[in-house]
Image (tube, helix red, strand yellow):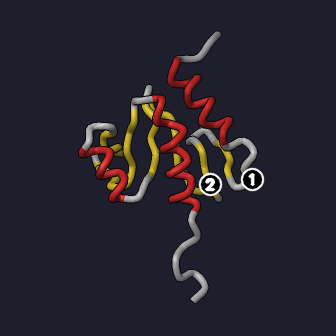
Amino acid sequence: MAGSLAEDAFEGVRFSFSDIDEVTETAEGLLVNGTLFAFLEGDDLVVELPFARSNDLVERGIAVRFAVEGVKARDWVRVSDQQLWPELARESHEFVGEPAVGGDS
């Protein structure tokens, strides 16, 4: 049985990370170095991005804030436009996968 259009689009996103060792997939979604960065929620992609970027996407009507149990997560957004999913998933991967600043001091 074929998946939904959103599931098919998310499959493409998953495939784009298939050759990156630091990325794993769990029932939650895609993780980089063990930290969630992208997942499918209904027909939307949910990604974590820097606040300025997520805020810009929300202000332009491209994304909406993702709320967990009534609490808005300031850097997480939901995006329905599947054409943007690969780009935003890459941005999220880079953002979440960055090493912590000052970690060696």
* Residue under numbered circle 1: 21
> Where is residue 58 shown, x and y percent of the image?
28, 44
Q: Amino acid at mark 2?
A: Val
> Where is residue 86 shown, x and y percent of the image?
54, 38
Q: Amino acid at mark 1?
A: Asp
Q: Is residue 69 above or below residue 11?
A: below
Q: Earlier in the sequence, mark 2 or mark 1?
A: 1
Residue at (40%, 58%) from the top-left corner?
Answer: 50
Residue at (58%, 70%) from the top-left corner?
Answer: 99
Q: Is residue 104 above or below residue 60?
A: below
Whole-angstrom CA distance, mark 2 to mark 1, is 9 Å
Q: Is residue 47 above or below residue 62?
A: below
**Dot 2, crowdedness within 10 Å: few (<14), some or many (≥20)?**
many
> Where is residue 38 shown, x and y percent of the image?
52, 44
Whether tag 2 and tag 1 are in contact, CB under 8 A, the answer is no
Q: Is residue 71 above or below residue 80?
A: below
* Residue under numbered circle 2: 32
Q: Quadrant of residue 27?
A: top right
Residue at (51%, 42%) from the top-left corner?
Answer: 87
Q: Quadrant of residue 53?
A: bottom left
